[in-house]
């Protein structure tokens, strides 16, 4: 038997009223509010994820901030088995931005270290301009930059007389993409690496974010520092300023 529409509407209205009274008594939110609450939580989570990842930095294509030290130490495994590099010279001030960088014009600290395979690698005042790239295995911007730089190196982009040196630092066994030597091997990284298991080289060069670039002139002085991903065109433009002086 079909019931009159008016009766059905009255019963639906009575059920809605009862549901509202029940929500008021229990203190729970009505069902229509749940999608809005869930949507708001998703938005908040997305904002926090962007902030914590270090995205949206103005320099380069983004950079990752240096995280707090892990409990129980920073490096372990293959990186920890390598002795810390030796450093001489005056440490550079912490990097705050490329504009009016007080490190420009200062002598870059000299570093003598080793690659993951034990090969000696050095940053020396030897009359050759240098590009020094600091990388952390857990940094998503470093992970994006490494294949770009490697493709440029493999294509013969490095000018004659220029040294390109990388520093593997910020190593943490509790962070993603560990260990760093396996990561760089997967990328076919051919740039010489100074392993920095205790972050002393990073500190001496004033690192505050990854990836971190330091450009050194033939006279051994810092010409520029920046953080974040660099395009090949920006990298080459900065290098021209080093090799033409």
Image (spheres, grey):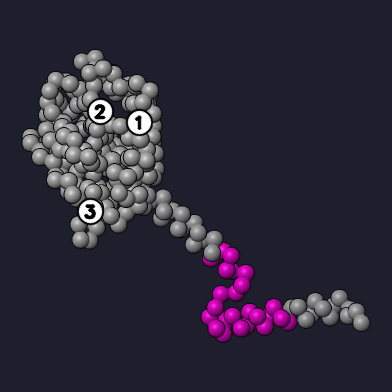
Between 78 and 45, the one nearer to me in the picture: 78
**Label 1 environment density (alpha carbons within 10 Å; few <14, some 14–19, many ≥20):** many
Where in the figure is residue 78, as x and y percent of width and height? 23, 49
Which residue is labeled 1 in the image? 149
Residue at 37% from the left image edge and 40% from the top image edge: 186
The answer to whether residue 234 is above or below residue 50 is above
Decide whether the magenta segment is chiefly helix, strand or loop: helix
Q: Which residues are magenta?
A: 14-37
Task: Tell me where residue 137 appears, x and y as whole percent.
Answer: 31, 46
Of mark 3 and mark 2, the one earlier in the sequence is 3
Where residue 146 sits, quadrant-wise, is: top left
Q: Is residue 126 left or right of residue 70?
A: left
- Disc 3 vs disc 2: which is toward the camera? 3
* Mark 2 surroundings: few (<14), some (14-19) or many (≥20) residues within 10 A: some
| Vertical placement of residue 183 versus 15, above or below | above
Which residue matches tag 2?
164
Look at 25% across and 28% down and name the residue there.
164
Circle 1/circle 2 CB separation < 8 Å? yes
CB within 8 Å, label 3 to label 1: no
Q: Which residue is mark 3?
A: 76
> Helix, strand, or loop for circle 1?
helix
The quarter of the rendered structure image containing the N terminus is bottom right
Q: Is residue 189 visible?
A: yes
**Left or right: where does residue 60 sit relative to residue 196?**
right
């Amino acid at each position: 038997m079909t019931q009159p529409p008016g009766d059905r509407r009255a019963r639906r209205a009575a059920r809605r009223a009862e549901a509202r009274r029940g929500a008021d008594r229990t203190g729970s939110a009505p069902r229509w509010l749940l999608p809005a609450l869930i949507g708001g939580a998703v938005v908040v989570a997305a904002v926090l994820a962007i902030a914590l990842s270090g995205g949206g930095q103005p320099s380069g294509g983004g950079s990752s901030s240096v995280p707090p030290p892990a409990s129980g130490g920073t490096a372990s495994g293959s990186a920890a088995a390598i002795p810390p590099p030796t450093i001489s010279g005056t440490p550079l001030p912490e990097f705050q931005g490329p504009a009016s960088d007080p490190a420009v014009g200062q002598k870059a600290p000299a570093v003598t270290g080793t690659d993951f395979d034990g090969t000696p690698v050095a940053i020396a005042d030897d009359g050759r301009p240098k590009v020094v790239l600091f990388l952390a295995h857990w940094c998503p911007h470093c992970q994006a930059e490494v294949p770009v730089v490697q493709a440029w190196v493999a294509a013969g982009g490095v000018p004659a007389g220029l040294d390109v040196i990388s520093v593997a630092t910020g190593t943490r066994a509790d962070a993603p993409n560990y260990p760093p030597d396996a990561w760089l091997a997967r990328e076919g990284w051919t740039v010489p690496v100074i392993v920095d298991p205790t972050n002393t080289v990073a500190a001496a060069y004033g690192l505050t974010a990854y990836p971190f670039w330091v450009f050194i002139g033939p006279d051994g002085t810092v010409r520029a520092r920046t953080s974040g991903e660099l395009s090949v065109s920006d990298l080459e433009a900065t290098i021209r300023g080093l090799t033409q002086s």
